[in-house]
Amino acid sequence: MVDKKTGIKSKTPKAQKLETSNKKLVKSKVKPEPEETEKLIPDSELPVAAEPKTAAKAGRRSAKAIKEAEEEQARQARIKAGKVVPEAPKEAKKPPRSRVERAGKKYREVAKLVEKNRLYPLAEALDLATKTSTTKFDATVELHVNLGVDPTQADQNVRDNVTLPAGTGKTLRVAVFAEGDEVAKAKAAGADIAGEADLLAQLDKEQTDFDVLITSPNLMARLGKYAKLLGPKGLMPNPKSGTITTDVPKAIKEAKAGRVEYRVDPAGIIHLGIGKVSFGADKLQQNADAVMVSIRTAKPASLKGTYINSIYVSSSMGPSIKVAL
């Protein structure tokens, strides 16, 4: 029905009575929920928030460094409070011993014969090298020449061979890879091993019972597959060392007489044995002169500046002696 004064449609008394009864019916079916009571949780059971990760993996902000810094602060505080006696400063470590001090008794005795800052003439240095040998065997006298070259440059890679007048003091086994009549000529010239099939059979078994291998240019190609075996041992024939030649008998005699090959190492130094202690100073002098003449002759044309920087002489396991240039 519509109210005449307000003009608003209102519910009839019957509709209002029906709505009231429906509300009472709904209220009787819905049970009121009990009020929740606050429960007190002990502090020990409360979740602890994780500390922020501020420590670094390394450096002054690492966990280890922070811990050490805190311990040091606590230690300094105890020292100021008089609870801890400060540690005494550590004694300085002794300097490392020199090579002479670390060497054996015999080496220390002969090292006294060499004046540290003196430059010896070559003849006197060789004589002193024979006196400072400490070995029971016949030691080798070595010559070490430091050159002012750059080995990485192809034209400054000093390399040559020289025949020592007094020999090397070593008995060399010479092998010759030859065929046909050359085998008989090689054996007549003094070759210890000469042949073709027999020598190749030994190389197939990786047997190298020789110190020098000589061959002719026409047979060199057949030794190519043995480069990995012969190369690292310094046995691969090479025209620069005189082991690839058409005059095989001459090469055999030179090898037996004492021909040696030298070459600068990556540091630009030549290391070469020039004889035995038993040779004496005179024979060693002859060999040393021949080597020095060969080294001076092999001076690269492109080199500017000092060619020979220093020369040292020593025996096997003996002290070094500096030679005057």
Image (spheres, rainbow, N blue to C red):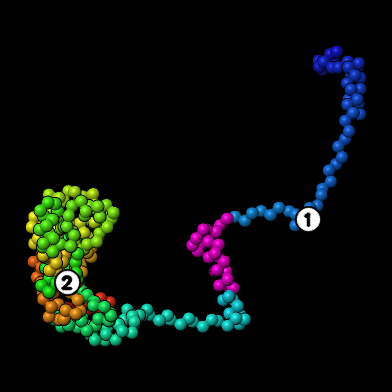
- Quarter of the image where the C terminus is located: bottom left
Look at the picture and state if 121 lies above or below 36: below
Residue 202: image location, x then y, percent? 25, 55
**Which secondary structure, mark 1?**
loop
Q: Is residue 279 left or right of residue 42?
A: left
Q: Amino acid at mark 2?
A: Thr
Residue 64 is a magenta residue: yes
Task: Indicate the quadrant where residue 19 lies.
Answer: top right
Work out whether residue 173 or residue 2 is closer to the camera in this orientation and state it: 173
Residue 232 painted magenta: no
Q: Residue at x 88, y 26 (%)?
A: 26
Q: Badge 2 local density, few (<14 within 10 Å), some, or many (20+)?
A: many
The reply to whether callout 2 and callout 1 are in contact (CB within 8 Å) is no
* Disc 1 crowd, CA 10 A, few/some/many (<14, 14-19, 20+): few
Q: Position of residue 161 (x, y in %)?
A: 13, 64
281 to the left or right of 136: left
Of residues 115 and 80, which is closer to you in this image? Answer: 115
- Amino acid type of disc 1? Pro
Q: Which residues are magenta?
A: 53-74
Residue 117: numbered disc:
none
Q: Position of residue 67 (x, y in %)?
A: 57, 66
Residue matched to label 1: 42
Closest to the observer: 106 or 293? 106
Label 2 secondary element: loop
Q: What residue is rendered at 18% in x and 73% in y?
A: 169
| Residue 276 sits in quarter | bottom left
Q: Does the image show residue 46?
A: yes
Above-or-below relation of 91 to 166: below
Question: From the image, which quarter does the N terminus lie in?
Answer: top right
Whether residue 305 is visible, yes or no, is: no
Residue tagged 2: 168
What residue is rendered at 17% in x and 71% in y? 168
